[in-house]
Amino acid sequence: MSSAHTAAGGLVPAADTPTLLVKIFGKDRPGLTAGLFETLAAFAVDVIDIEQVVTRGRIVLCALVSAPAHGTGTEGGLRATVHGWAEAHGMQAEIISGTGDNPSRGVGRSHVTVLGAPLTAETTAAIAASITTTGGNIDRIFRLAKYPVTAVEFAVSGVATEALRTALATEAAARSVDVAVVASGLARRAPRLVVMDVDSTLIQDEVIELFAGHAGCEAEVAAVTAAAMRGELDFEQSLHARVALLAGLDASVVDKVRGQVRLTPGARTLIRTLKRLGCQVGVVSGGFTQVTDALAERLGLDFAAANTLEIEDGKLTGRVTGPVVDRAGKARLLREFAARAGVPLSRTVAIGDGANDLDMLNAAGLGVAFNAKPLVREAAHTAVSVPFLDTVLYLLGITREEVEAADAQGGPVTAGLRSA
């Protein structure tokens, strides 16, 4: 589905000014929009509003116009002429008389993005009903993507964004779909900063478990990692305990682990699209710079920060050097990256899956829980539960067509890595 919506510059008809709503619908073909307005031009009408939608080759085109100017014809003449033109082109026409412009939309405007795989009619009805129950009005709906998930966006007015987000979070959980609610505004699509966790977010793996596999203690480390990600253990203490089990490993294992790392499906598309749309992208990780710096260079990231495994005499010591990147550290680094990027926190997006990401998710303008633990899903602004990282683009109002256009530009995506 494609949609266009414009308003005539500076023309605001009085409430009692006669206006006509002209609607045509039928099989789409080139030249219909131009043809309709050429027909209307003979009556010297002013265009007040336009809306056009094309779905599966069928067009609905609506034009709100002023009544015919004096001396250019009558309303009856306009009706007859438009109907004749429509019939000649195999279209149907409807013309409704009225006065004034469209009613003003209520204060409080938001974009509601719904992700479903699939998106059912029952779910769509429930989301729409919830919007209405909060006092909101659906002004417009259009599709952002049809694969790898169906993504649609509702433009909603008349209700505060936070109230709408709260109401729809409950509905989304009940329907097992992902719903994101963000405030509307001119800055929504402006360049921003996107910062993501690495383990189980940017990549499919937990890096420390990959190291543990070479040390023969994978099961033990995995159990501690899972408890830490659920928020059951202090992250810094759990990190030191897990790293201690790696003592004595040959440093050559670093290259082996780098080779084992698997990017999450959609990770390259997400980063490439964001960069080509003028965004800056970074990672913060409770993992290790020995892996994250290589990922940052490979993917053209702007920022990267993680813990560093200590290596002496060609062996891992079982310790990390410097301050630990933990839950509080991730939020601090988000703020630091934003300051260095010249982006206000309100224009930042954070993506993560574990309890140690929560402070970062809450500090960002939009926090996205990606296939996250229940604790994190409940606390984040929104959640994505499908295994495709590029679906985050739809939460930012970026359509699949824009993603494909960015890909079509070709050429490398470059960046100057600025590690913390």
Image (tube, rainbow, N blue to C red):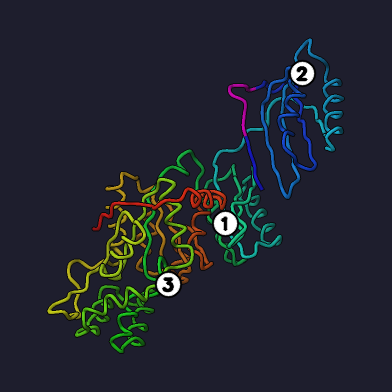
Discs 2, 3 touching: Cβ within 8 Å: no
Residue 268 falls within the magenta-colored stretch: no
Q: Which residue is denoted by mark 2 in the rendering?
A: 42
Q: Nearer the viewer, residue 339 or 132?
A: 339
Q: Give the Cα distance between marks 1 and 3.
A: 32 Å
Q: Nearer the viewer, residue 40 or 67?
A: 40
Give the label on residue 204, or none: 3
Mark found first going from the N terminus, 1 or 3: 1
Whether residue 171 can be seen here: no
Above or below, comparing residue 23 to residue 17 in the picture: below
Q: Which residue is denoted by mark 1 in the rendering?
A: 167
Identified by mark 2, the residue type is Ala
Whether residue 113 can be seen here: yes
Q: Secondary structure at mark 2?
A: loop
Give residue 4's quadrant in the image.
top right
Residue 10 falls within the magenta-colored stretch: yes
Span shown in magenta:
6-12
Give residue 69's quadrant in the image.
top right
Q: Nearer the viewer, residue 173 or 4?
A: 4
